[in-house]
Amino acid sequence: MKTRIIALVLLLSLALCLTACDDKATPSETKAPVARDTRAPETQAAGTEGSLHGVLTDDAYVNDILKLRVDKPEGWTFFTEEQIAASNNLTGSMLNTDVAALLEQNGQVIDMMVSNATGSNNLNLLLQPDNPALDAYSDAEVFELSESAFRIQLKSAGMEISSYESATMKVGGKERTVLCLVLDYSGTEIREYQIWCRSKQAYMGVLTLAITDGSDPQPILDKITIND
């Protein structure tokens, strides 16, 4: 059950990124997501200042380019590099691949995953190259224009969207536009919250919080700090 929920959360994150791009610009060919660079943070992509991947400690994940910090919620556990790699069908030396090259080749990189003890609730960060076509749109507009394609893509995966709307929520104490979804997957209700981090550089991030046990998402959103 835990593995199925985690796989589903990753699918949902990828689906929104891909449908948003489809609605605004001609998409490039996309492949399976890949895990992050585990070497010292010198690797950069053109147009960025700093590391492409965040720094993970026992208590927090920090990504300087996205100006993002995620403090570990109480009772939750960060996925290790090896676990993230396994989620993306990568092993061994593939963890040390240049992140910039992986972004160029595959389109997305999962950089952080953290979940509660049962795996019923999960927060992850997906990195992808910035799409300049999105710059003229607010997050709420991106979410609205993506709805039709998103519903079609999820239905093909056996999921129905019961509710799809953007809302203003507190994220790290600041108001942000969050995409709020209620989905049904084989009788399991999933409440998902998507937050976009736009770095105004070469890439962006999408945070996805999925709740399947009915708990309040706010304590987890309080652990996210975005200083953009």
Image (cartoon, rainbow, N blue to C red):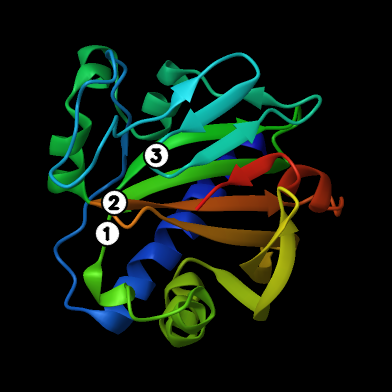
**Taking 74 as reference, is 26 above or below it?**
below
User: Residue at position x 74%, y 32% from top?
Assistant: 116
The part of the image, by quadrant, that contains residue 140 is: bottom right
**Taking 189 as reference, is 204 above or below it?**
above
Report if residue 74 is visible in the image.
yes
Which residue has dot 1 on it? Answer: 130
User: Residue at position x 35%, y 35% from top?
Assistant: 88
As shown in the figure, which amino acid type bears the numbered disc 3?
Answer: Ile
As shown in the figure, which amino acid type bears the numbered disc 1?
Answer: Asp
Is residue 137 toward the left or the right of residue 163 in the image? left
Is residue 198 toward the left or the right of residue 191 in the image? left
Q: Give the CA separation, mark 1 to mark 3.
A: 15 Å
Q: Give the CA separation, mark 2 to mark 3.
A: 13 Å
The N terminus appears in which quarter of the rendering? top right
Query: Which tag, 1 or 3, sits closer to the chain's start?
Result: 3
Report if residue 162 is visible in the image.
no
Is residue 228 toward the left or the right of residue 104 in the image? right
Query: Which tag, 2 or 3, sits closer to the chain's start?
Result: 3
Q: Residues within 10 Å of mark 3 (few under 14, many from 20)?
A: many
Which residue has dot 2 on it? Answer: 203
Q: Residues within 10 Å of mark 2 (few under 14, many from 20)?
A: many
Asked whether the beta carbons under mark 1 and mark 2 sit within 8 Å of each other, the answer is: yes
As shown in the figure, which amino acid type bears the numbered disc 2?
Answer: Tyr
Picture coordinates of residue 66, whole percent (x, y): 42, 45
Q: Which mark is residue 110?
A: 3
**Taking 134 as reference, is 32 above or below it?**
above
